[in-house]
């Protein structure tokens, strides 16, 4: 199966970043307080199309760190985490139990605004970048992203159990993923992130976010949006099914009858 | 070759679907059934969400039953009046079925209900058919003439009021059991995504005592309308019909049915029924196995409105 590499982002902002590099270096003695670091990502397209032969893809996003301290860069003190977060939806998670020998959906917990997909690329293993408290505060990473239960007053143990199960299920079907080493520095300031779009990637508006850390400390975040849409035909079918559902049903019946009739014409023996 | 299904929202292999359609078409041509009871579980095994498998299965059955009905109309082996009365019941049953379907879906119990209905109905029908056909084979071996038992125990059903005459079937019976049968099968069509041929055929023969030569034609005629109605209702209420998926299955099915029909002519009636019974039982057992065996994960994600 063809894995298309979608080259979505090519940031040209690295040009000013490179040009801007010499002056701070010269001025370093005079001004020890350099400008705060900033992170940028740019998407050359804001739309990814799912065609009929879509079987997952790799999404490449380029970005740069502005005002990077060359010394920290050389020591590998900068870390970048890039996230592609899918559209959020309310979800129900069921725990199955055996009743009279049959597995049935027994207990459920509803969550509001769960991202349908969540793909992460990091420069290093997450535990080497910063501590769990930071991740929790930033709601960053499949293991720490905040999932809001519908019934917040519910039993904390139950909520914790279902939250963990929700993360585990999403990771198991590939909708949540973590690509350690997926962000690579091409120069001291320029980086490239490779994110995984699974075959079942949800359509809708996705948010690409990049987080910059310096020596384990969160510095800056930036974001950009990306629309994942079905290609013309698939989109038309989907829209018709939802907006003109009666006509769509009628069309489905007519197609079936035509197919049956054609089959008879081709294969008839009587 | 992969193809992205616009409603099911997953990528599947075109050839797997064509082969699935062809295999089911072959069997349906061989046994004279719609094949919905095979296609829906197969789609579920192939990771198509159950709600979509059911609605799309109904859509797929229209093609094979329409093709079959045309052939029977030409031979004059369709009791149109009986078919229409069955249909009147079927429309009511199918509407109730689609409504119940939506309720079960909102409670998160749809998958269980579909599996349970399949296991119960396929298990019962398959079991009864297997016993009957094995007896027939034994009788044929013993040299006796296999005769349909003329049991009189259902006569009170036929003697209910509101009698109606069905000329093609040479029947004069109450419309109540006819409407009831139609409604019951319409209900199952909506929830299970089947045409109901595997229940309709024995019911027409044993309950209403319709002559065997018009049974298949009338059943196909009725199935065609019930599944067409189910497709309309499902797409309007639940938006779960995937045209692309249905079309691929139909193409395979229509082709497979022709070869199945040829193969079917080579086998004896009782052997055919025994094979069909074994097939029906195998599907029932496979589904029952899934219900009783521990799942890979005890947790299951669903969207609030469905599965």
Image: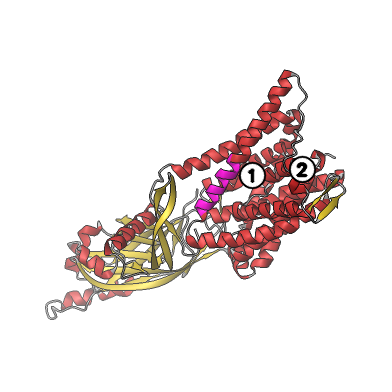
Q: Residue at x 47, y 56 (%)?
A: A200
Output the chain of dot 2. B
x, y percent for residue B240: 59, 60
Q: Answer with mark 1 or mark 2, whichever residue precedes in sequence.
A: 1
Above or below: residue A134 compared with residue B160: below
Quadrant of the image occupied by residue B7 = bottom right
How far across and down, in percent of the image, does residue A34 sit? 18, 78
Mark drawn on residue B235: none
Which x, y percent locates residue A247?
A: 69, 66
Task: Identify the magenta region.
Answer: B111-123
- Name the residue carrying label 2: B216
Judged from the image, the secondary structure of the residue bearing numbered disc 2 is: helix
Q: Main secondary structure of the magenta part?
A: helix
* Chain identifier of the residue bearing label 1 in the image: B
On the same chain: label 1 and label 2?
Answer: yes
Query: In the image, which is nearer the foreground, mark 1 or mark 2?
Result: 2
Q: How many labels does the image show?
A: 2
């Amino acid at each position: 199966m063809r894995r298309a590499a979608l080259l979505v982002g090519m940031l040209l902002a690295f040009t000013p970043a490179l040009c801007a590099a010499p002056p701070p270096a010269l001025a370093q003695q005079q001004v020890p307080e350099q400008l705060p670091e900033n992170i940028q990502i740019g998407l050359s397209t804001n739309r990814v199309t799912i065609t009929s032969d879509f079987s997952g893809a790799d999404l490449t996003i380029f970005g740069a760190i502005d005002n990077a301290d060359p010394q920290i860069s050389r020591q590998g003190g900068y870390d970048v985490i890039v996230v592609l977060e899918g559209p959020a939806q309310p979800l129900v998670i069921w725990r199955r139990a055996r009743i009279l020998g049959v597995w049935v959906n027994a207990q459920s917990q509803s969550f509001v605004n769960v991202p349908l997909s969540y793909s992460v690329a990091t420069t290093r293993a997450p535990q080497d970048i910063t501590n769990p408290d930071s991740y929790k505060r930033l709601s960053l990473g499949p293991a720490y992203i905040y999932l809001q239960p519908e019934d917040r007053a519910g039993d904390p143990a139950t909520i914790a159990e279902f939250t963990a199960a929700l993360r585990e299920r999403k990771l198991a079907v590939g909708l949540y993923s973590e690509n350690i080493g997926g962000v690579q520095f091409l120069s001291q300031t320029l980086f490239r992130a490779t994110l995984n779009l699974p075959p079942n990637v949800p359509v809708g508006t996705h948010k690409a976010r990049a987080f910059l850390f310096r020596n384990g400390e969160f510095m800056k975040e930036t974001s950009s949006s990306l629309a994942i849409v079905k290609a013309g035909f698939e989109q038309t079918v989907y829209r018709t099914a939802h907006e003109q559902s009666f006509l769509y049903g009628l069309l489905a019946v007519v197609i079936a009858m035509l197919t049956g009739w054609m089959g008879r014409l081709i294969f008839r023996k009587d | 070759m992969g193809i992205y299904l616009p409603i099911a929202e997953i990528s599947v292999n075109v050839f797997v679907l064509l082969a699935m359609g062809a295999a089911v078409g072959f069997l349906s041509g061989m046994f004279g059934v719609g094949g919905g009871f095979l296609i829906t579980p197969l789609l579920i095994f192939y990771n198509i969400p159950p709600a979509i498998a059911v609605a799309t299965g109904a859509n797929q059955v229209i093609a094979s039953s329409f093709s079959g009905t045309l052939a029977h109309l030409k031979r004059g082996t369709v009791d149109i009046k009986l078919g229409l009365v069955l249909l009147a019941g079927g429309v009511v049953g199918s509407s109730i079925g689609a409504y119940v379907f939506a309720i079960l879906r909102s409670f998160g119990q749809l998958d269980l209900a579909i599996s349970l209905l399949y296991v119960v109905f396929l298990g019962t029908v398959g079991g009864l058919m297997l016993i009957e056909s094995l007896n027939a084979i034994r009788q044929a071996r013993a040299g006796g003439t296999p005769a349909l038992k003329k049991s009189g125990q259902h006569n009170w059903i036929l003697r209910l009021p509101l009698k109606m005459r069905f000329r093609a079937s040479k029947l004069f019976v109450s419309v109540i059991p006819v409407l009831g049968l139609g409604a019951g099968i319409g209900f199952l069509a909506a929830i299970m995504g089947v045409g109901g041929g595997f229940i309709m055929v024995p019911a027409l023969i044993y309950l209403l005592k319709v002559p065997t030569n018009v049974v298949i034609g009338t059943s196909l005629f009725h199935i065609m309308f019930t599944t067409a109605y189910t497709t309309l209702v499902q797409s309007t209420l639940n938006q779960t019909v995937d045209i692309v998926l249905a079309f691929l299955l139909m193409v395979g099915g229509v082709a497979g049915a022709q070869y199945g029909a040829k193969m079917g002519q080579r086998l004896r009636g009782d052997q055919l029924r025994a094979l069909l019974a074994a097939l029906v039982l195998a599907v029932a057992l496979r589904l029952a196995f899934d219900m009783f065996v521990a799942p890979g994960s005890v947790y299951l994600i669903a969207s609030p409105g469905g599965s």
